[in-house]
Amino acid sequence: MSSNNCIAVIDFETTGLSPAMGDRATEVAIVLVDQASGKVVDSFQSLMNAGRYIPSFIESLTGISNAMVAAAPAADTVMREASRFVGNAPMVAHNASFDRRFWEAELGLAGERTASQPFACTMLVARRLYPQAPSHKLGVLIDYHRLPRAGRAHRAMADAEMAASLLGQIQDDLRSRHRVARPDHGVLLALQRCAKPGVGALVAKYAEV
């Protein structure tokens, strides 16, 4: 399905914390969510071989082994497919600064034009909307809202699906509790940028009158 009118929710699994330190992606998953209905309309997932060794503690965390990556498609091939899949859709991730860095770095290494679309972050938005939550980690927020878990945590598709589910919860709460008629990507960006004391005023700006 075309990515027009969709939000692309993305998650990477990687060999470490930062591409600036030589870390590379080992898996990517993207879930396309229709902005109007909030429903998942398409998905993309692939392991990728970037020629980097996966440390044992990362293998234990993700379940992704060096043997699995060795048999996977080349990272540049996967990233070209992922870029085509996303198209011009605005993007969302949980702890988006992490995923944005790997998205941009891997696209660059694949020789693809760096995507210009902004990333909204469900973690930052959740911190502003749900300050009472015990933590703003993805799994904790999923349990806090009693949303279904999707497969093993720290695998890209499961985390992307849970981030998409959390995004749906955020949008539902903006509609029902804060009377925001269209809690689209632009609203999410505005919320994540504002200081916590200003959240009420910002939400009121977008509320129906």
Image: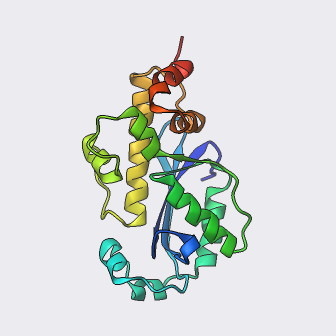
Q: Is residue 89 above or below residue 43?
A: above
Asked whether 16 or 80 is in front, the reply is 16
Residue 159 shows up from this direction: yes
Q: Quadrant of residue 5?
A: top right
* Residue 173 % position (x, y): 39, 29
Q: Is residue 31 visible?
A: no
Reply above or below: 66 against 207: below
Q: How is the image coloured?
A: rainbow
Q: Is residue 16 above or below residue 38?
A: below
Give x and y (percent) for residue 83.
Answer: 64, 63
Left/right placement of residue 6 relative to residue 152 reads right
User: Which residue is pictured at 32% across the width and 57% down the height?
Assistant: 150
Percent across and percent down for residue 178 are: 43, 22
Decide which of 2, 77 is in the foreground and name it: 77
Residue 65 in the image: state x and y as whole percent.
37, 83
Q: Looking at the image, which residue is at 45% across and 52% down?
A: 94
- Identify which residue, 194 or 184, lies in the foreground: 194
- Front residue of 21 and 181: 21
Furthest residue in direction top, as rendered? 209
How many badges with numbers are in the image?
Answer: 0
Q: Is residue 111 left or right of residue 155?
A: right
Q: Which quadrant: the C terminus?
A: top right
Name the residue located 30 percent from the left edge and 53 percent from the top edge. Answer: 139
Q: Is residue 125 above or below residue 173?
A: below
Drawn side of residue 31 relative to residue 129, left or right = right
Q: Residue at 46% of width from left, 43% of height from top?
A: 124
